[in-house]
Image (cartoon, helix red, strand yellow):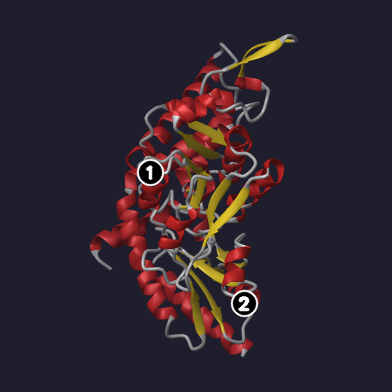
Amino acid sequence: MTNSFKSISQFRQDFPILKQDVNGKPLVYLGNGATTQKPQIVIDTLREYYEQDNANVHRGVHTLSARATDAYEGARTKVKNFINAASEKEIIFTRGTTDSINLVASSYGHANIGQGDEILVTAMEHHSNIVPWQMLCQRTGATLKVIPINQRGELLFDEFKQLISERTKLLAIVHVSNALGTINPIEEMITIAHQNGVPVLVDGAQAIAHISVDVQKLDIDFYAFSGHKMFGPTGIGVLYGKQALLDAMPPYQGGGDMISVVSFSGTTYNDLPYKFEAGTPNIAGVIGLGAAIDYLSAIGLDNIAAYEHHLLDVLTKQAQNIDGLRIIGQAEHKTSILSFLIDGAHAADIGELLDQQGIAIRAGHHCAMPVMEFFHINASARASLAFYNNEEDISRFISALNSSLALLR
């Protein structure tokens, strides 16, 4: 590794969970596509909130509430700057990517999509960017159309251009496939969609911690992501939406801060962003997300991306030397995900045997059953990298994989 890569790998010391043994072996965590581990600063931030500032936000004049509100709204500003949104009003806190997409489907979808309309998705979507649109189609009479992929796990771009039409009312696409690692050409797709008057929602769950995202430069209409995929707490996420779109959308849920005035004769809704933040929010989660953003920003996403690309290259080359190993997803542009199968070995068995040697990977359909169906498989094993991984992790993974195969074959 170069000196710059070595300096990035040193950040693994900030993650206390990585210092433990699992089944008598030092932990090698390669399950980052499912969730990322948390640096000490995020853990400390959560503890500090509960120990010193625990109070509800926007609802008290006392000191604790004021401090909690300042930290909560400060995190909103951090998110706004992290993705270069135009205003804090465009940052809606949700429970995660799934909740964000459901918000758009329930609010924007019901207000703007009806009988005979079409929603366009890709064949590599996570279930969370399929099922809400299927449910909307069932209720409204709209139709879900699917952009196909090739055997490398890349979108067929010409097919996309042919599928978009005057009936298309929304393009909902994943930025990075969680099952394949493919980075989709969202900038070009957004341009074509907008040329046809079609708004775009992007599922950014797998991209947000690996790729710099500028929502204004990309001209994204909606962008959804989760805190736990970017070294922050679970149960917190973000929906970015252009202010004009969010202003026009009806509320998703009722109660709490989403109101301005309530009477039995009617209710006046609050302004953005609070119109979409009903009930007591995940205050600690929001503040912890702000700490995670500070941490990522200090390292630099461009530095992270370059290091993770290096690790993926090392991992891929070593994995290809294993007899009978088939990589699922070999797109030209991809992030740090290696999904694979090995002849004569079930993905779940591989995962369990690796766990016995302290190696954590994901095995299954990865909430992307249509991808598995396309490749005529039931499941795959997936090793997904983060910047706290290093080449020693890869060597241990390859060694453990070879040991496991000796037992399975």
Q: Is residue 158 shown left or right of residue 105?
A: left
Residue 349 rendering spot, x and y as whole percentages: 65, 77
User: Compared to 163, does 201 lie above or below?
Assistant: above
Q: Which amino acid lies under the numbered mark 2 shown in the image of this protein?
A: Leu
Q: Residues within 10 Å of mark 2 (few under 14, many from 20)?
A: some
Query: Where does the N terminus fall, quadrant-wise?
Result: bottom left
- Element at label 2: helix
Residue 207 rendering spot, x and y as whole percentages: 44, 52
User: Compared to 63, does 206 lie above or below?
Assistant: below
Query: Where does the C terminus fall, quadrant-wise?
Result: bottom right
Residue 197 rendering spot, x and y as whole percentages: 43, 40
Question: Marks 2 and 1: which is nearer the front?
Answer: 1
Which of the labelled discs sits on residue 195, or is there none? Answer: 1
Q: Are marks 2 and 1 in contact (CB under 8 Å)?
A: no
Q: Earlier in the sequence, mark 2 or mark 1?
A: 1
Which of the labelled discs sits on residue 353, or is there none? Answer: 2
User: Compared to 370, does 99 lie above or below?
Assistant: above
Q: Which amino acid lies under the numbered mark 1 shown in the image of this protein?
A: Gln
Q: For residue 327, say whether it is visible.
A: yes
Residue 100 rendering spot, x and y as whole percentages: 57, 40
- Element at label 1: helix
